[in-house]
Image (cartoon, rainbow, N blue to C red):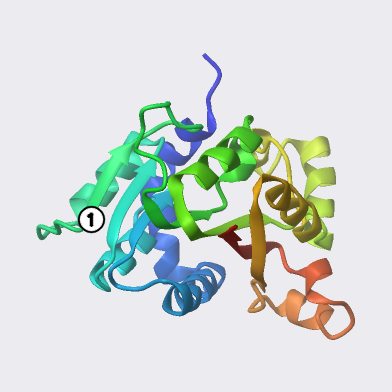
Amino acid sequence: MNPTVTDFYSETASHFNHKYQTSATFIERYEVWTDLFKKYIKPSDYILDLGCGSGVFSKYLAERGSNVLGIDGSEKMIDLCRNANTRSSPNLNYQLQTLPFEDNFVEKNQFDVIISSSVIEYIEQDTLLLEQIYSLLKPQGIVMISFPNSNSIYRKIERIIFKMTGKPAYYKFVKRLYCEELITKKLASIGFKQEEIHYYPSQNTVLRMLNLFLPKPWTATLFVGVYRKN
């Protein structure tokens, strides 16, 4: 049986979680996302963390008082989340779930905010999943969603290197890349309106030098967009 993206991240679950303490890129990602949480999310909100990974964002939001459901396709990731949640948190739950969702996953119009950090690029039926996200959100609900930036010089080089060497290993599971313009147009066709976009990281020395000469949409390897349901 050929390995899947779920198998890949299951094998690297603990290592992935550790990066939020050791990697400057992951630390900056955490800061970018949590700044957006402070701006858009209220303590009483119902949150779906779609592709929650090690649960770092789910835990953060639950500690601020939100009701959070974290879902992931990796059983090892979900186990990691549950084991890390050492004290009982009635407002934080984790569930093993494949994407796109089964029809009976939850009721429509249930969540105030849905977050998804670098997940959609691995989903073959990405349009269906984005439509499901729209249906799960309450009116005027928010989706915060990030992608590898296809306009990035680094991503263009990465694609060439993968074709030549088969590395980095994760790239074999990527179904498509997005740029800000493409995903914003796609989400607009579903019924979302863009609120704001942030490009990151910027801590890398090479990226800091490139940013002296080029705009961030050409240098940053990732971006997160905030979109509101019309």
Looking at the image, which residue is at 83% across and 53% down? 157
Q: Quadrant of residue 229?
A: bottom right
- Front in this rendered view, residue 142 or 126: 142
Residue 214 x %, y %: 88, 77
> In the current view of this chain or complex, which residue is farthest to the left?
88
Left-right relation of 41 to 94: right
Can residue 15 be seen here? The reply is no
Left-right relation of 102 to 81: right
- Front in this rendered view, residue 44 or 100: 44
Left-right relation of 25 to 184: left
> In the current view of this chain or complex, which residue is farthest to the bottom?
212
Residue 147 to residue 30: above or below: above
Q: Quadrant of residue 47?
A: bottom left
Residue 10 to residue 39: above or below: above
Left-right relation of 228 to 12: right
Residue 53 x %, y %: 41, 49
Can residue 228 be seen here? The reply is yes
**Crowd rating for badge 1 (residues with CA inside 10 Å; few <14, some 14–19, many 20+):** many
Residue 89 x %, y %: 15, 59
Looking at the image, which residue is at 78% across and 54% down? 150
> In the current view of this chain or complex, which residue is farthest to the top?
1
Residue 184 x %, y %: 73, 56
Q: Amino acid at mark 1?
A: Leu
Q: Secondary structure at mark 1?
A: strand
Looking at the image, which residue is at 45% across and 74% down? 34
The residue beneath circle 1 is: 92
Residue 100 to residue 9: above or below: above
